[in-house]
Structure formats: C-alpha cells, structure tokens
Image (cartoon, helix red, strand yellow):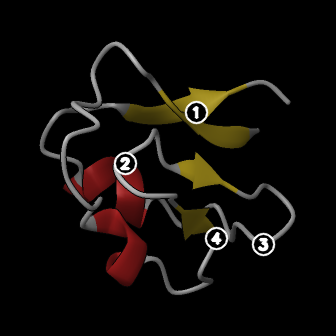
Amino acid sequence: MAYTIDPGRCPQNHRCPLIGLCPAEAISQEGFSLPRIDASKCLECGLCAEHCGRQAVHLADR
C-alpha cells in the first residue's frame, strides 16, 4: 500500500503542514502546488493521514 493525496480535498493554497510532520521527509511540495508523497521514502506510519485536517491523505494501491 502507499499513501496518496487527493487533489479534490487538498486546498493547494498554502504550504502543507504535513511536510514538517513526516519523520521520513517523504512529503514534498513546490510552491503551493499539490504535495507529493515519495513512496520510496514513506514509512507508512500514517501520521500524515491522521493529521490532515482536510482528510486528503489516504492509502491507495501502488
């Protein structure tokens, strides 16, 4: 499984607060674009999904 970010739920109008939360530094973002989760770095700990206020992060099949 891998975590993904739903562009329909992510407002993409600010720096994603989940970037600093990720212990593996797997979340990146250019400007205010849709954040990306690097599956090769992701520990699948679930912190991003748990703390996303928009519930935009969820598990998806690779």
Query: How packed is label 1: few (under 14 Cα within 10 Å), some, or many (20 or more)?
Result: few
Q: Which of these two is toward me, 30 or 54?
A: 30
Q: Which residue is mark 1?
A: 59
Earlier in the chain: of badge 4 and badge 2, it is: 4
Q: Which of these two is toward me, 58 or 13?
A: 13
Distance from label 4 to label 2 (Cα)? 13 Å
Where residue 25 sits, quadrant-wise, is bottom right
Disc 3, disc 4: CB below 8 Å?
Answer: yes
Give the amino acid at mark 4.
Ala
Disc 1, disc 3: CB below 8 Å?
Answer: no
Give the amino acid at mark 1.
Leu
Q: Mark 4 or mark 2, which is nearer to you?
A: 4
Distance from label 1 to label 3 (Cα)? 15 Å
Q: What label does residue 26 carry, if any?
A: 4
Task: Name, please, the residue furthest toward the front.
Answer: 31
Earlier in the chain: of badge 1 and badge 3, it is: 3
Q: Secondary structure at mark 3?
A: loop
Q: Which residue is mark 3?
A: 41
Earlier in the chain: of badge 3 and badge 4, it is: 4
Q: What label does residue 49 carry, if any?
A: 2
Disc 1, disc 2: CB below 8 Å?
Answer: yes
Residue 62 location in percent, x, y?
86, 30
Q: Mark 1 or mark 3, which is nearer to you?
A: 3
Give the amino acid at mark 3.
Lys
Earlier in the chain: of badge 1 and badge 2, it is: 2
